[in-house]
Image: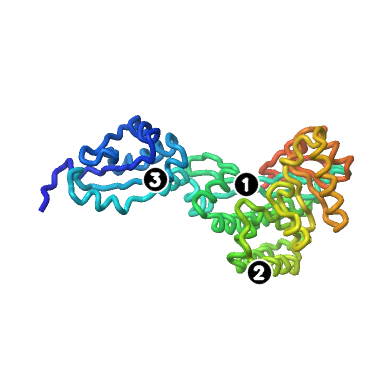
Amino acid sequence: MQNVNLATDDLKLIIQPCDRETELYLYQLGFRPIESVPQLLYRIAGEAKLADLFFRISQLISDSAQIASRFLVTRLSLESRNLLVEFLSAQPLSSMTLMIKNSWFLQVLARQRLFFKYQPIFDLKSGRVVAHECLARAKSDQGQCFSGQQLIDAALSMNLTFEFDELARSTCFESLAKLCTKVGAIEVPQTFFVNVLPNAIARDPKTLEQNFQQVMELGLHPEQIVFELTEVEVLENHADLPRLIEQIRSWGFGLAIDDLGSNVAIDHYCMEFRPDVIKLDRGLIHGCSRYVLKQVMIKSLLQFAHELKIAVLAEGLEDGNDIEFCRELGIDLGQGFGLATPETMLWQARSDRLLSTAC
């Protein structure tokens, strides 16, 4: 039996770097080569400091290098003949750094720490607010706030988009019920755009029925809700998706398509699903008053949509000239920082004052 002492009992992080650059970064963090296997680098790290070490590695080494490099945490002696055998089970470094880096996201899901901001959607012709888009945000236990993009990026990197989408929808409806109760009989725009991942509802159709039941139980009306289909990942081929869209409509929910003009296929979404609203991507809208090519594309999409009796919404409106161009062109709706920023408040169209939500 091998003798065990304090040196061999120490917890060691062993990494096989994928290239010379990664090796040099690890040297900066105090790693050193194992004498008998110099292509492997190690550092003694107590359990309390291991998470911090992984986090520092995630900040220093590129994502691609984290994927290509492998790691092992062991208490074996560096001279043990079993070390290389154990290293055969080494995992990509990214499998741990992603978890450490996005540990806040796991807490958000586990503790349901989402809240929402509401961005007004304007009728560009009248200038009135006609709806709000519900935008997910989160706050950590330490009080740090996370944007919608940070939430989406974390969900994608950890393959938790379905779990995030389901939690966001459920939490959103609860927030809307509190909001509508708080504003009471005051006349305010009460149409809300709620983001939905097509892959998520296709994977688990029962969540849609649960959403419908939740909306009814909370005293909301399906006609108040516009499901906004958004693609943050490659849309999979789901034969049942058209049927699910029809189910959404039969319950009374509205339907919008996000990011048209970027990665969203016009023929797939508009010809097959016939949404109530299509949203022109901010990349297409930004600078539209100056770039002829964008103007041609926008005019074509606008004509196409109006012939199908689909309303068109320009998102990402920030510049006054772009706003005026879209208004004169006949685009129906608009949203963006140039019109109003997302707030934990609801914009009251008639008096232009804000109504606080319970967030």
Tell me which residue sits at (43%, 48%) in the image.
Answer: 99
Please say if 273 is above or below 291. Answer: below
Residue ID for mark 1: 359
Mark 2 or 1: in front is: 2
Q: How many marks?
A: 3
Compared across the picture, whether 315 is left or right of 15 comes to: right
**Dot 3, crowdedness within 10 Å: few (<14), some or many (≥20)?**
many
Q: Which amino acid type is marked by label 2?
A: Asp
Q: Is residue 230 visible?
A: yes
Label 2 and label 1: CA atoms lie apart by 36 Å
Task: Give the camera-side residue of 264 and 104.
Answer: 264
Q: Is residue 181 visible?
A: no
Q: Which amino acid type is marked by label 1?
A: Cys
Residue ID for mark 2: 240
Tell me which residue sits at (64%, 64%) in the image.
Answer: 211
Please say if 118 is above or below 197. Answer: above
Q: Position of residue 18 (x, y in %)?
A: 38, 41
Task: Give the camera-side residue of 130 and 216.
Answer: 130
Q: Position of residue 81 (x, y in %)?
A: 18, 49
Residue ID for mark 3: 93
Q: Mark 2: which secondary structure?
A: loop
Task: Give the camera-side residue of 236 and 160.
Answer: 236
